[in-house]
Structures are given as structure tokens and as C-alpha cells.
Image (spheres, grey):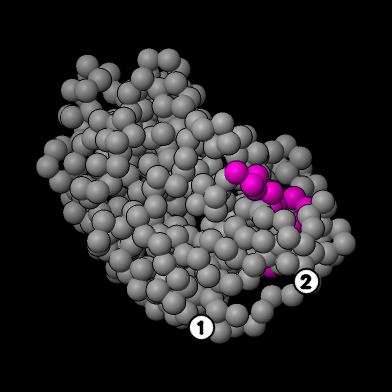
Amino acid sequence: MKALVWHGKSDIRCESVRDPILEDSRDAIIRVTACAICGSDLHIFDGMIPEMHHGDVLGHETMGEVVDVGKDAGDLKVGDRVVVPFTIACGECFFCRNGFHSGCERTNPDHAKAERLWGHSPAGLFGYSHLLGGYAGGQAEYLRVPYANVGPVKVPEQLTDEQALFLSDIFPTGYMAAEFCNIQPGQTIAIWGCGPVGQMAIRSAFLLGAERVIAIDTVPERLALAEAGGAETINFRTEDVYPRIQDLTAGRGADGCIDAVGTEPDTWSGVDAVVDRIKTATFLGTDRPHVLRQAIMCCRNFGTVSIVGVYGGLLDKIPMGSAINRGLTFRMAQTPVQHYLPMLMDRIVKGDIDPSFVITHRATLEEGPELYKTFRDKRDGCIKVVMKP
């Protein structure tokens, strides 16, 4: 089959690789009908994610049609149209039973590597590093889905692939980011990053009752899409974010602040961001937490900082004195997609939201390597790429 394959920093190729087969009675094989490039895939593209191996198949936003199924894969059958959560969960361990599927204790065969770095291992993920299982991803013609009795969810006939695809990751992630803020009527939520997850967080914050959303970015197309969703925007290249948020909130600060950027903010977004970039380039640091620092400083006393941007290692110079003295709450996670997916599917069916609004580029797998560059460099108005193998 054809697939997008990692060969090193900035080196992704469309190649022929071995077709997946059933390896366990709970497996399913799907023929991929739609997949997407995620912002967190760019961290792989930029060489920020460790334990990538030459030949790894990428991608964790995937849906398609079941073409083969193991005898213990629940009620799935050949021909079912499904969307696949990016988190791989067993459905039986302590964390799965409590709705924390992204903390599954059983699905990361490389858990010892993760434990050395993080203390404990999260769940395995599709197409995302051998720290997280080394599972082949879904930017391919076919995908093996382990624990298919837990993961894939059938898609109603009335929904298109483009409406359902983002239930695999960015819609649940954006919704969770907003939900973490415990939004109350009349509140103001500030969101750093108007990429796909940030756009979903904007719409989700309003769905959950926010009165105002302030969105921070610098790319004109992203800011325009945020404004189309009802957000007030700040261009961090032309305005100083902290005093602007103070002005917009009568000096109190935002009730909730969402970091939807993570480890790769714009290098020129602040002096500290430049220093972070130098540290990572010279192997004196692992991550660049400019956005997290700013979110902490902009959050009101006893507010919430919600973190869904990807970080991988150790963060420098986080203003914990500000956080502890002002009573901030931090909430963060890899999204337990299985927990959110059925409810958010219902939201789409009811017409509360159509996640396909975020798509700007449609392509084939063969066009994928070039579109990784387009997406990374924010060229051609690129906000979200969907590929149809």
C-alpha cells in the first residue's frame, strides 16, 4: 500500500509499504477514506519528537471502511464506516474504566521508554513515536486498528467523511481544552493558537457557555477564521498580548487560558521565545514554553490554565510563583478521545457544529509530503489538510 513515511527531520515520503494484517482477534483493518495532517505531526516533521525510526508510517487522524475484522472486535463488521480515535485503549484497565483512555496501562508496548522519561507511560498512539508504541499510522491506504472493540466508532450515514474525520482528534481535543476551563456564563476565555485545535476550542468555548473568546495568533487566515467563529483577536506581532488582555478584561485577566500551541511557538513572539529557540538548537533545552508562560501571566486570580499543546520534556523558567500565589488551576492531557467521541458525534448530527469548516486543502497521499511543508510554513492560507487515499 501507499503511505506517508518518516525518514528524518523534514524528510517525509510517499512510499509503498507492507499491507497491514490482523495480528490479534480484537484487530480490525480499515481502508482509509480520509486522513489529515495534524499540528502535532509537525513536531515530528521538525525533528522535535524522539524515538522516531526510519520507515515509520505517520498519521493519527483517520477514518474509513472496515475491510477485515477479528472475531473479538465487538460489533464491527466488514463494510462499517468508522472514525478511529488517535488514542489506543484496551477498555479494561483502571484508566479505561474511569474514562481516562489516553492513560491506558496496556496499549504501549514501549512503556519502559516512556516511564524513564515521564515516570509513567500513557496509552499507545497511532503514528507517533516509539515512546508511544511505534504503531503504524493512518496517513496510508490501510490501517490496522488494535483493540477495535474499544476504539472505532460507526459513523451515521448522514455525516460526510469531512464532518466525521476530526472526531479522531482535533474536535475532542479542542472541546476538552474548553471543558477544562469549567466555563461559567459570562466568562472570557483566551486561546493561544488559531490552528485547527485552537479553532475547535473557540467554537467549543461558545458551545459551553463562554460570553467572550479572545484568540491570539499572527497568521491572517487563522485570525480571520477565529473572527468568523465569534472570537475577538490579538495579533501578537502588532500588539503586546498581556496589556491587551488586561484592557479587554477590565484589568482582571481571562477566566480561562488555553495553550493550543505547545512546544513550537513562533520564535519571534517574545524575547524568551528567542532564548528558548537558542537553547533547543544547542541541546540546552527540550521545549519552548513561551505560550505557557504568557497564559499563566494573563490568567485571572483563581482562574484555569488549560494545556493541550504538545510538550515532550522539561520546561524552563515557568512562573510558578505567579501560579501558586494567585491560585491558578492547571489542567492538561492527551485527549481520551473515546470518552468524548460519542457525545461530540451527537453534537454534529444535531447541527450544533460542523467541524469541516476548518479544512483549507484537500489532497492525495502523493501530495502529502509537500503539504507538510505548506502547513508547517503556513503558506497558501493552509490551516488544515485532508487527504483522501
Residue at which label 2 appears: 22
Tell me the crowding category of disc 1: few under 14, some 14 to 19, or many 20 or more residues within 10 angstroms, Cα based. some
Distance (Cα) linking label 2 and label 1:
21 Å
Whichever of labels 2 and 1 marks the residue nearer the N terminus, that label is 1
Range of magenta residues: 144-158
Q: Is residue 124 left or right of residue 225?
A: right
Residue 262 x, y percent position in the rendering? 39, 50
At a point 87% along the width and 62% down the height, the residue shown is 71
At a point 58% along the width and 72% down the height, the residue shown is 141
Which image quadrant is residue 96 in?
A: top right
Q: Is 382 drawn above or below residue 129 in the view shown?
A: above
Residue at which label 1 appears: 15
At a point 47% along the width and 35% down the height, the residue shown is 353
Tell me the crowding category of disc 2: few under 14, some 14 to 19, or many 20 or more residues within 10 angstroms, Cα based. some
Residue 160 x, y percent position in the rendering? 54, 50
Q: Is 75 drawn above or below residue 181 in the view shown?
A: below
Mark 1 lies on a secondary structure that is strand
- Give the camera-side residue of 182 and 385: 385
